[in-house]
Image (spheres, rainbow, N blue to C red):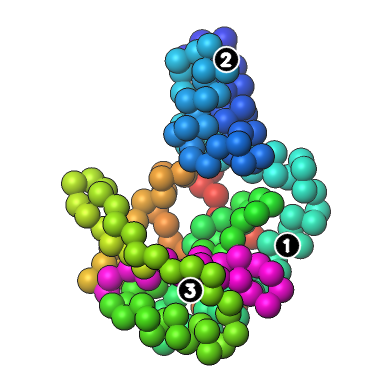
Amino acid sequence: MNTDSSDLRSRIAREAATLLYFRLEKEYKQAKLKAAQNFGARVLPTNREVALELDKIAEENEGPARTERLIQMRKEALKIMKILKAYCPILIGSVWRGTIRSGSDIDITMYNDEPDEIVALLKANGLKISKTERMTLAKHGKTETSFHIHGETSNNLNVEIVVRNSEEAGQRRQCETFGDEIKGLKIQELEKLLKNNPAQRFVPS
């Protein structure tokens, strides 16, 4: 790749990240297409390239408060995960990665065939549930169904809990943004992290 092409790709990645950061686009694909169109180009950066630029923009705009908010969100995630301890919850998404930005929510996933149990437990423990929905997604020739619980903590942090079928437990899932395996953090791992290195990041080099 020549220097001009590489520079153009970088500028498109930055433009796509800007569109995502300021909520002018919601999806990476659409943001990349719009950014390329803005430059009159056909080259598209990878999701990872856009994500790294998005991380930079968040840091530039939010500064030290971003780290403080990350730690607060991880602490709040731990509280919710302890409520759901019997279901082996895993913290994923930007709060796991350490790449939060303004408007990010806490993403937790688990495997269970009775999502109504999860909803009832969360309500009983004070989580304000705003919406629940069952989603079906066609992926790599297979159909995946998951149950999404959207809620809000007592200190106004948004939470999304994804309940997947128990038969999917143990399956490796690839991150569509960074291309690596989504490992996330279990309760004990998150407790250790908050004790030793609360702002640690999990972004592939």
Q: Nearer the viewer, residue 164 or 135?
A: 135
Between disc 2 and disc 1, the foreground one is 2
- Which residue is pictured at 41% across the width and 49% down the height? 175
Q: What secondary structure is marked by label 3?
A: loop
Q: At x 58% / y 79%, what residue is drawn?
A: 127
The image position of residue 158, as x and y in percent, is 60, 65
Q: Gap between marks 3 and 1, in whole Å? A: 20 Å
Q: CA distance from mark 3 to mark 2?
A: 43 Å
Q: In the image, which residues are magenta? A: 148-166
Residue farthest along the left direction in this orientation: 141
The quadrant where residue 151 appears: bottom right
Numbered tag placed on residue 186 in the rendering: 3
Q: Label 2: few (<14), some or many (≥20) within 10 Å?
A: few
First in sequence, mark 3 or 1: give its number. 1
Residue shown at the point (53%, 11%) measured from the top left: 40
The disc, 3 or 2, on the residue closer to the chain's N-terminal end is 2
Answer few, some or many: residues within 10 Å of disc 1's Cα (few below 14, many 20 plus, some between 14 and 19): some
Q: CA distance from mark 2 to mark 1?
A: 34 Å
Residue placed under numbered mark 1 in the picture: 69
Which of the 4 image quadrants contains residue 176? top left
Q: Are marks 3 and 1 in contact (CB under 8 Å)?
A: no
**Does 152 appear in magenta?**
yes
Residue 146 is situated, as x and y percent measured from the top left of the image, at 33, 64
Q: Give the image location of residue 117, x and y in percent.
A: 38, 85
- Frontmost of labels 3 and 2 is 2
Q: Which residue is mark 2?
A: 39
Placement of 111 over or under 66, stated as above or below: below
Pointer 3 local density, CA inside 10 Å: few below 14, some 14–19, many at least 20: some
